[in-house]
Amino acid sequence: MSTARAQSFPPRPQGGTRRRARAVALGPAALLAGLTAALLLGGCLERSRTGGADSQAERTASPAVPATPTAPAAGKSSSPSPLAGEGRGGGSGGTHGLALGSGLKYPATFTHFDYADPKAPKGGTLVLSAPGSFDTLNPFSLKGRPVAQLATLVFEPLTEGSLDEPFAEYGLLAQAVLPAADGLSVTYRLRPEARFSDGRPLTAEDVAFSFRVLRSDAASPFYRYYYKDVQAVETPDPHTVRLRFAQRNAELAMIAGQLAVLPKHLYGQGDFGQDFVRRALGSGPYTVAEYEFGKFIRFRRNPLYWGRRLALNAGKDNFDEIVVKFYRDDTVRLEALKAGEFDFLAISSSKQWAVDVAGAKWDQGWLVKRELPHRNNAGIQGFAFNLRKAKFQQRDVRHALALALDFDWSNRTLFFGQYTANHSYFSNSELAAPGLPAREELALLEPLRAKLPPAVFTTPVAALGKPYRDIREQLRAAQRLLEGAGWRVQGGVLTNTATGEPMRFTVTLVQPAFERVVEPYLDNLRKLGVQATMKVVDDSVYEQQLRTFDFEMVVASFPESQSPGNEQREFWHSDSAAVEGSRNIIGIRNPAVDRLVEAIIGAPDRQTLVTATHALDRVLWHEHYLVPNWYNTTHRVTHWDRLGQPRTLPLYYAPQQLLRFWWADAARAAALRRAMAGDGPLRAR
């Protein structure tokens, strides 16, 4: 047993809010830090790399990566330089923030975000849960399974995004940001008061070290792709960092600020990938108080946190302690919530939401059940083919296998009508390709026509089963595609007529709850003669198989933002297909896709970006790289009614980001205790 302090899980503190003097304080530092992410990466955006219940929430042990921007742009910019900020005016002072595609919502004099309550009380303990396990405190290494919250509670980036406006970043560790007029560099002026939790000053050398180590082989390969165009990191003085770019890249001045800053005096010693499994020290508002690998971790708010008086931290990080408990089974996890073992749960299973999140404790108001609206880009979730396997190399074969999914039946029978079929790689956003290619798109696509599926030019992007009346028509169409590709049923088994190879593959899952979702798909595949099976493996085995691409088909999710950019290289680009641990788990090697990815990254303005994304969407869709799944437009959450919340919700967020602005409500907690003591309903306050 690996523990910081070898002991059983400490008892849950009771009582209401407790104030602590001077104890004040998602940001994008996890996969889909906010979103990988942490994003990407611990909330319920129905996205991640791995198989969950019927949507992809939380289930990932990926290293922490900066979140891609999560906000749909309200407007479009045709300016050659789409970055907006205040206080630039040609001076050397820089601006307090940057925005892409629109102006900043919050001025330099703002006092708090609209979705925060600056009067929120401090104190109390928030107990959360997480699926699976963890075995490292290093959220940046490719090795091991970290705790998602490490990247956002313990470590901090130079800038932090807001959750209620188009892609915008505000200075956190950096008090000022100055992008160069030629677009080839950006300068950050650090806050002189910034400190790591051990009291050591945070300097430009720490920033330079962080860029160096996180882009090395010791860290996740994501960083090397995301920051590929950062050519040099300069430190003119202890509080100034200048990043020079290899080429003009509209979003690079913003995403450069998303990189977490690590203390060089700690992580600069020894082997970064090996030696920091049990050490996590950053500049963030919390420290690691204790943990037991695989069971729990306790974060404690640092009363001396350097940034507690910053406007972007007002009303944020209100709990004295945050505890995360780990559960390997979702059913056990929900029962633990009912028993009061933790406070809050985001639900990723439609069956759980419709059937299991119910009963006396909800009827009496002790537990709250809510659907929280959001405007997040849904990206895409699907059953992903591993193109490294010869059987999946033919586009028509992939298309045929995808047609065996009967979404309408699954949504009606299994999902209680809660989902919408994915109809794009950028579903629920203006980036989803509309109709047939417009003139501007054709300018990108025509030079690539010989490398593209004809359907890119002739068939609108739409949910896969839309042209067919029912699943029988879909399966007949699938059979025709298979026969045209040289596959016929022989002796009841779909067989390659040239090689004699049977079509046989396994869908690898990480949670038993997903079996009910996959089984109907396998039943339809068997009607085509496909020998398809599924298996459930331990989460550590699953992560290893993903990292080494040792699978045939998995449930995968690709979270997207309304400002796609450098992260597209790691999702789809040929350069990432053979890199162990990359997010190109499909194994795409397509020169046309590469060209369109580079067009997105190099887009000089919003309209050009949208056009290039539409073109990429069409190509990815008609290449049939995965079997499209589904999404929804709310976060389904349930929690004990002892938590206080601001009146205003953000627009673009994951549930774990939202919790950063909640607090322990003493009055609610007292009312709940009285109701539970009398075994009666919680009366209106």
Image (cartoon, rainbow, N blue to C red):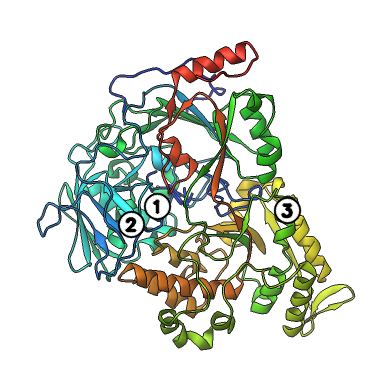
Residue with the mark numbered 2: 255
Give me the disc on residue 412.
3
Determine crowd level at label 1: few under 14, some 14-19, many 20+ residues with C-alpha closer than 10 A: many
N-term mark: 1 or 2 = 1
The residues tagged by marks 3 and 1 sit, at their Cα atoms, a distance apart of 36 Å
Residue with the mark numbered 1: 66
Q: Position of residue 300 (x, y in %)?
A: 40, 27
Q: Amino acid at mark 2?
A: Ile
| Apparent side of residue 558 relative to residue 103 in the rendered image (left or right) | right
Residue at image location 71% in from the left, 38% down from the top: 355
Q: Position of residue 51 (x, y in %)?
A: 63, 52
Residue 222 visible in the current orientation? yes
N-term mark: 3 or 2 = 2
The quarter of the displayed image where residue 234 is located: bottom left
Task: For the residues labelled 1 and 2, say whether their Cβ atoms are less than 8 Å apart.
Answer: yes
Q: Position of residue 485 (x, y in %)?
A: 72, 83
Camera-nearest residue between 294 and 36: 36
Q: Secondary structure at mark 3?
A: helix
The residues tagged by marks 3 and 2 sit, at their Cα atoms, a distance apart of 41 Å
N-term mark: 3 or 1 = 1
Q: Position of residue 476 (x, y in %)?
A: 79, 75
Mark toward the viewer: 3 or 1:
3
Q: Amino acid at mark 1?
A: Pro
Residue at image location 56% in from the left, 18% down from the top: 683
The quarter of the displayed image where residue 98 is located: bottom left
Task: Relative to 109, say whether 222 is above or below.
Answer: below
